[in-house]
Amino acid sequence: MTYAQDPQYAEFLLSNTQSEAFSRYLEEQNIPFQDINPLYKQVWFPLDRLSDNLLNDTIYTTIPKLYIPQSLTALENTGILQIQKRASLALSGRNILIGFLDSGISYTQPAFLDSAGRTRIEAVWDQTEIATQGSSAPFGYGRLYTSTDIQNALQQPDPYAVVPSRDDTGHGTAIAGIAAGSEDTDASFSGAAPQARLAMVKLQKAKPYLLTQACLKQDQEIYAESDILCGISWLMDLSRELKLPLVICFSVQSWQGSHNGGTALERTIDYLSDSPGICFITGTGNEADQQHHQMMNSLTNESYAITELLAESHTDSFSMEFWAPPVFSFVLAIISPSGDQITGLMPRLGSLRLSFPLDETVIELNFETFRSESGNQLVYFRFLTPSPGVWTIRTDLTANIDANLHLWLPPASTITGSVRFLRPDPFTTAMVPANTPQNIAAAAAQTANTSTLSSSGRGLSFSGMQIPTLAATGEALLAPSYISGYQPFTGSSAACALCAGASALVMEWGRKNNDSRYLSTTDIRTFLLRGCSRPPGTAYPNAQSGYGYLDLESSFLNNF
């Protein structure tokens, strides 16, 4: 078993821009490490040397962030069907590779076979399997299945006896089908790019220590940032090997970080966004109406701001992130449901462990005043066995500086019990990596493309950057089931998949018209925005639908 899969080792993400002397130091100290991409390396340490609260041992930016799947007539509404049928273009995603990082793919589904019955899946990297001796698994863990392996399996009475990789939840299968499922006229179904080639990274679940750090359930589909970064590198290597342009569809998102483009994944996407022949598509998540975000502005008539958290009965431990701009000064006080309070909590480097005896609750606070991502301040809360009721956090504002303060809770599905803000704000809820400056971040719209879903993550970013980029249908999209047939699929992931398929068609058009014209994320972003539909009565761009609603036909018409 490799370090990447060994539950007794914790991995951390470190900058790869350090001098070679740092790598030599790691080797001299017998500290295992591995380069992921030009920006980051992962380093492993034995868990028995670390505390449950990793922030007592390291800084926030080194801990891999956690990601979850985002799912809760579309092609015609987005102008994709019209482009598929337009004879002068005849676009279908041919000779374009679409990469997915998700729960896997049901490779036996007819949606992933061509008209001759051959698989359109170029490869599956199943990170959940144990590498066999002598295998060429990417980064030394999991199992790699090629198109030859998959095609051979399809010819057997029991395909899964040959290639055992399955999609256990159906999320990855649905996303891949919406983006690039083969046309099925009997079921009135087609993916956006029905002749594209596919590649799937079946992500392994995050190690238990990361879930313990964030006070999350241990039985959920939650993935680690380090595995996602390795998946991106493998997809890029595969596209170079096949000599095919690559569109990467990010159907998993995270609530962690400052929502300002500073996580390792966002920095990696931003670094690659201008590279020709690669396009990144993300969703915005489904957290806007979940009451898991609060924003406070410092320039109020009061000298303090109040945050009220309602913890329902039987709520287990949970974490919360409080983010503030770099130069902002404040002092915190915490008041428990019983009225017990601790005041005078000034942000400073280090940690505090606060006891509320009347409530039988412990709260751990970790302060990072200048070492967090993007230079912003972080106060990391861990509520351990909180008593039910309203927990109040008072923020005394000690500096006359115009600033927005943000607090985020984990998604409801990841927590045992229920906790929410009593003064929630649906804005600045676009999940990571949607806050990357130059990617294509798709909000989820209703079927008629007249408004976004109430759950769809909204902008702007922490620093006021325009998020989302655009909106696309994300409601009741027909998608292949991981068991058999088709089923409706709703959520941010659906809109993301639709945009990934549309981007593959644009990438194909660029390649057909000029073999040397490999479009970048920035190129395709501009191309799509020029055709977005913008219903009257609304100013654009905005925090709900960005620059408007995806209309691929108009994008082609407006670019000629």
Image: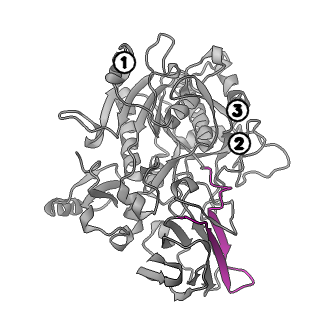
Task: Find out whether residue 311 is within the magenta segment.
Answer: yes
Q: State the residue position of label 3.
A: 78
**Real-space CA distance between mark 2 and mark 3, rounded to the nearest whole angstrom:** 11 Å
Q: Nearer the viewer, residue 191 or 215?
A: 215
Task: Find out whether residue 557 is within the magenta segment.
Answer: no
**Disc number for residue 158:** 1
Residue flagged by tag 3: what amino acid is it?
Thr
Quadrant assignment for the N terminus = top left
**Real-space CA distance between mark 1 and mark 3, rounded to the nearest whole angstrom:** 39 Å
Residue 419: give x, y in percent of width and height: 60, 64
Residue 205: give x, y in percent of width and height: 40, 47
Q: State the residue position of label 2.
A: 445
Crowding at mark 2 (Cα within 10 Å: few <14, some 14-19, many 20+): many
Residue 478: give x, y in percent of width and height: 64, 29
- Residues at marks 2 and 1 touching, judged by CB atoms closer than 8 Å: no
Disc 2 versus disc 3: nearer the observer: 2
Q: Earlier in the sequence, mark 2 or mark 1?
A: 1
* Residue at disc 3, secondary structure: loop
- The segment highlighted magenta reads 286-315
